[in-house]
Image (spheres, coloured by chain):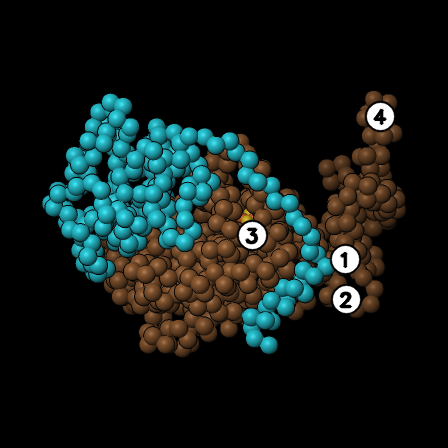
Amino acid sequence: MSRTFVGMPPFPTAARAALADTQLRANLAHATTTIRAKRAAVVAELDDWEALRLRAAAIKDDVLLHLDEHLVRLEESLTARGAVVHWARTAEEASEVVAQVARAHGVDEVVKVKSMATQEVELNEHLAAQGISAWETDLAELIVQLGDDLPSHILVPAIHRNRAEIRAIFEREMARVGRPAPADLTDDPVRLAEAARLHLREKFLRAKVGVSGANFAVADSGTLVVVESEGNGRMCLTLPEVLVSVVGIEKVVPTWTELDVFLTLLPRSSTGERMNPYTSTWSGVTPGDGPQEVHVVLLDNGRTRALADEVGRQALRCIRCSACLNVCPVYERTGGHAYGSVYPGPIGAILNPLLKGVGHDEQTDSLPYASSLCGACFEACPVRIDIPSVLVDLRAQVVDAHRSGVPKPEALAMRAAAAAFGSGGRLAAAEQASGLAGRALDALSSLTRRGRRAGGRRLVGRLPGPGAAWTDARDLPVPPRESFRAWWKRTDGGTR
Amino acid sequence: MSARDEILAAVRGAVATARRPVEVPPLDRPEREGDVDLFAARVADYRATVVRCPPEGVAAAIAAALPERATVVVPDGMPYAVPGAVPDAGLSSAELDATTAVVTTATVAIATTGTIVLSHGAGEGRRVLTLVPDVHVCVVRADQVVDDVPAAVRRLDPARPTTWISGPSATSDIELSRVEGVHGPRTLHVVLVGPADGTPPGAVS
Ligand code: SF4
């Protein structure tokens, strides 16, 4: 069984360990660079990419603001199509529905399509505790599961393993849980994929219960959509007699028509393909075709908490493409494990605190700081989630949650930054204020011992008083005495 | 309170003060004809085989695409003759696993992405039919080719199960090197039935 992320150290500690792993860094750099280039090429093929992003973001915003209506409609359509709808407030409730279905059919194993929602609720561990094995069928997930390991990337969870390691894992572990690896297995990816095909086919053909997530759920028609590459999804959705799909409540789209934009954006953003090899859609039970007993679990598990967050709400637009991971300079160097969650990278840095709330555990609270705020994620995101703004807002929330009494300067600064970047007028005002502060700090820097010049710019060393902790791990550049705007105005764009 | 009511109440509470009409911009793309040549090229990009033929050449093209001495299954309502093929009379998954190939038609095809879409009615068969056998031969008519994904979405019925196929199954999970064929059919042949424009039977694009 795969390990869980429970008890992971906070991001800075975990990141330091990951950075020391040169193999991991090389694999990650290769993977993210390759996917980035592919994505850029297929995105450039479409001349209306920005219009597609705007449409997708608006559809999701509309859904989120009226989510109750859409969920009720989805439930109606699913029920009308012969599906049984369950609602789960928590991870445990969702996992328990799956366990109940498995028990009702007297099975001790289920086959699974890779799904973020089932990883989030730690379904496999829950089932294992009841003596039910959940077989991961996605090649990478299989590698992770057999290697008793943790996924490190939404899309390519075994990105941290090279072919020699994978061969060793297959040779060692496959026989323990089913058909053994072929005796003459090599580390050729074609041979490794073949070994997985044979190992898993046995499981597909005998499985009675399949478990999936869904990329989209169409409220109007009760259609669920699963986007995949290998065909293991089709196997799990088609061969078993019983299918349980765990679907986050934010996955709703109003009608079938809206899939036009999402099925265009997702594969190009995700694997950098014009289209992924397989997409499956189904609506409840189709007589004589596929599972004849269909369950859908609608999962909250913190989503309504995130929905209530005015700035953070937009994170629920996420279609889990992983484009933001691949462009992130922090992720590229640390990998996914350091984020200590099934949702790594920039989206994980905002989604985890939004789902779980801040101020409860150090690990979650460290995530909003796992970013340089460079903005690459926002640019790559197909549903235009402004991750940097959400990060800044969450930092303020983390600080607020830890203080009693007066807000720390760090919290105020983050709040102010969030507010200032939101409007040009406020930015101008803030720059004036920072110009004042700059002159004050400039004077200060000559007084503190660490005050020095870097790249021609003065640095404040350790701030005195309440700002001290902030500058412990950071060099704070002295704000310029005059803002760019003010300089531009005074010199008429440098002409005076 | 039931889980359902509690979640719905939490949703209402979360958005109570935020509700506002959101203007959703429509998809603003000119309707273009599906470019059949582009479709053929894009399918070939996925390392699937594309064979173009006129309507009278379909049977020969299917026969050529099938491996020798293959066991072949065809769904109900298959409009083209496939000599020697077994009709699908509710074959079990194990029986399908012992079958080499399947021949079907499709509902719609997408030029810009090289995708074929099955909606599993007459001529297309149950979903399992095009999943378990290792070779899939799919006959697509040129008039079924649309330009893009949105056009395909418009042509499909959300109540039917659909399977969108873009090349053979593939994985890039091992060091990102692409391997064709993991769980679905490892070989995909598309027989593209042209308007009778004189494209010689068997011409490979
Ligand atoms: S936040 Fe955007 S870019 Fe990142 S995974 Fe979600 S949809 Fe993709």
Labelled disc at residue A492: 4
Q: For marks 3 and 1, give the CA distance.
A: 27 Å
Q: Amino acid at mark 1?
A: Ala
Total tally of numbered discs in the picture: 4
Dot 4 beta carbon under 8 Å from ligand 1: no
Marks 3, 1: nearer the viewer? 3
Q: For marks 4 and 2, give the CA distance.
A: 45 Å
Q: For marks 4 and 1, give the CA distance.
A: 35 Å
Circles 4 and 1: CB distance less than 8 Å?
A: no
Describe the element under mark 3 as helix, strand or loop. loop
Residue that badge 1 annotates: A411
Dot 3 beta carbon under 8 Å from ligand 1: yes
Q: Chain of mark 3?
A: A
Circles 3 and 1: CB distance less than 8 Å?
A: no
Labelled disc at residue A403: 2
Give whichever of discs 3 and 2 has the lower sequence position. 3
| Residue beneath the point at 34% across and 48% down | B119
